Amino acid sequence: MNDGASITLLVIDVFEQLQIPYLVGGSLASTVHGTARSTLDADLVAALRAEDVPILVERLQDQFYLVPEAIHEAIHHHSSFNLIHLSTIFKVDVLFCKIALLMKCRC
């Protein structure tokens, strides 16, 4: 498994622990489905809620550069934020969309 995939799995593991519905997109998803594409980041779509942020930050802050205020703003505006892995500078973009918000009706 490459670094990007294993770093993305660190974030996915926390999403699963917090029962945050998510989808993997972009180059990582394309590669898994057989069309290899080079990438310097990973794209996740998630149905993250404001109450998830403190635990998400607690579990990821030692390994990722993250800005809690940016996460809250992204939730409020249904936009995006990113997490940057400290030792590799690999970026995980977390995006919001209506489909993710409807998954499990968590909104």
Image (cartoon, rainbow, N blue to C red):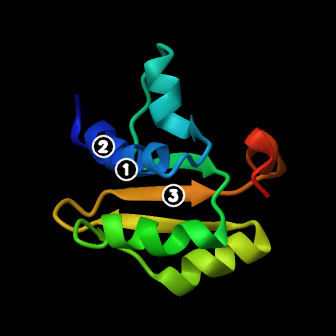
The vertical placement of 43 against 83, above or below, is: above
At horizontal 27% and vertical 40% (from top left) the residue drawn is 6
Question: What type is the residue that disc 1 sits on?
Answer: Leu
Looking at the rendered structure, the number of numbered marks drawn on it comes to 3
Where disc 1 sits, the SS reads loop
| Numbered circle sitting on residue 93 | 3
In the image, taking residue 39 as reference, residue 101 lies left or right, namely right
Q: CA distance from mark 2 to mark 3?
A: 12 Å
At horizontal 53% and vertical 71% (from top left) the residue drawn is 53
The vertical placement of 107 against 100, above or below, is: below
Where disc 3 sits, the SS reads strand
In the orientation shown, which residue stands out farthest toward the bottom? 69
Where does residue 92 sit, x and y in percent of width and height? 43, 56
At horizontal 22% and vertical 71% (from top left) the residue drawn is 62
Question: What type is the residue that disc 2 sits on?
Answer: Gly
Q: CA distance from mark 2 to mark 1?
A: 8 Å
In the image, taking residue 95 as reference, residue 1 lies left or right, namely left
In the orientation shown, which residue stands out farthest toward the left? 87
Q: Mark 1 vs mark 3: which is more N-terminal? A: 1
Residue 60 seen in render: no
Quarter residue 37 falls in: top left
Question: What type is the residue that disc 3 sits on?
Answer: Asp
Q: Mark 2 vs mark 3: which is more N-terminal? A: 2
Q: Quick check: marks 2 and 1 in contact, CB under 8 Å? A: yes
Quarter of the figure with the C terminus: bottom right
Quickly name the residue at label 1: 40
- Of tags 1 and 3, the one toward the viewer is 3
Quarter of the figure with the N terminus: top left
- Label 1 crowding class (10 Å Cα cut-off): few <14, some 14-19, many 20+? few
Quickly name the residue at label 2: 4
